[in-house]
Image: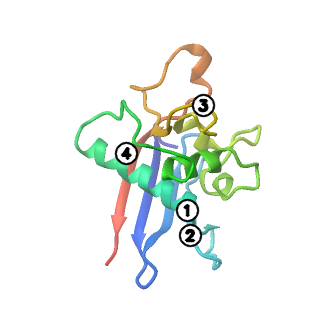
Amino acid sequence: MGHTNQLELYFGNGSTPGLYRTVFRPTTYPHPIVGIRGPLLQQQSLPFIWCTSCIALSILFVAAATQEAKGQLPLFPLLEGDQTSPAGAIGKLMNKGISSWLHDIFGSDHAGRPLLNRMILLGNARGRRQGPITATIKTAYNWLQSSQYKRRVMPLTFIRIFTEY
C-alpha cells in the first residue's frame, strides 16, 4: 500500500469516447480497484456505466488534476450549480444508497460507506438551502485536520489522466 490515495482515469475508447477505465489505489486496500465501463468484465475488474453522475465525477477529477498540475490548491469549489448541473449530479450520487456503483469502483469502509464520501467535499448537496450545490476534492489544505475529522477524511492527493485517440 502507498502513502497517498491515487486515482488513474483513462479516456478515449474509439467510437464511444469518454471514461472507459479507472484504477483507484486507496491506502486502506492492499490492491487497486479497477473499473471498466460497460457490461463486459475483464478479470479483476468491476463494471460502471457512462451516465450523468460518471460524467460529473470525471469533470470534477479532471478539474482537480488540472489545478494540481498548475500548482494551485483547490481552495474553492471546482464545480457549482443547481440540481441539474454536474455538481447536482454528484450530490444525487453521493446521497444514493449502498446499491450505487460508486461503492464498487471506489470501495467502502468497514461500515459500508463509500470511500468517495471521504474524498469529495459537498456543499448544499441536496439543494435544500439557498445557493448553489458545490463540489471539490478534499485535500490536506482545504479540510479541517482536527482529530474529530481525521477518521472521516481521505484526501485524494494524486490524480493521473490518460487519453487515447
**Quarter residue 154 falls in:** top right
| Three-letter code, disc 4 | Ala
The Cα atoms of the two marked residues, 3 and 4, are separated by 25 Å
**Mark 4, residues whose alpha carbon is within 10 Å: few (<14), some, or many (≥20)?**
many
| Three-letter code, disc 3 | Arg
| Three-letter code, disc 1 | Thr
Label 3 vs label 2, nearer the camera: 3
Residue at the disc numbered 4: 64
The Cα atoms of the two marked residues, 4 and 1, are separated by 18 Å
Vertical comparison of 119 with 107: above or below: above
Residue at 36% x, 59% y: name it: 161
Label 3 vs label 1, nearer the camera: 3
User: Which badge, 3 or 1, comes first in the chain's sequence?
Assistant: 1
Q: Which residue occupies the extreme left position in the image?
A: 70
**Quarter residue 4 falls in:** top left
User: Which badge, 4 or 1, comes first in the chain's sequence?
Assistant: 1
Q: Secondary structure at mark 2?
A: strand
Residue at the disc numbered 2: 36
Residue at the disc numbered 1: 52
Answer left or right for 65 relative to 20. left
Vertical comparison of 148 with 142: above or below: above
Label 4 vs label 2, nearer the camera: 4
User: Which badge, 1 or 2, comes first in the chain's sequence?
Assistant: 2
Answer left or right for 47 relative to 155. right
Question: What is the count of numbered marks?
Answer: 4
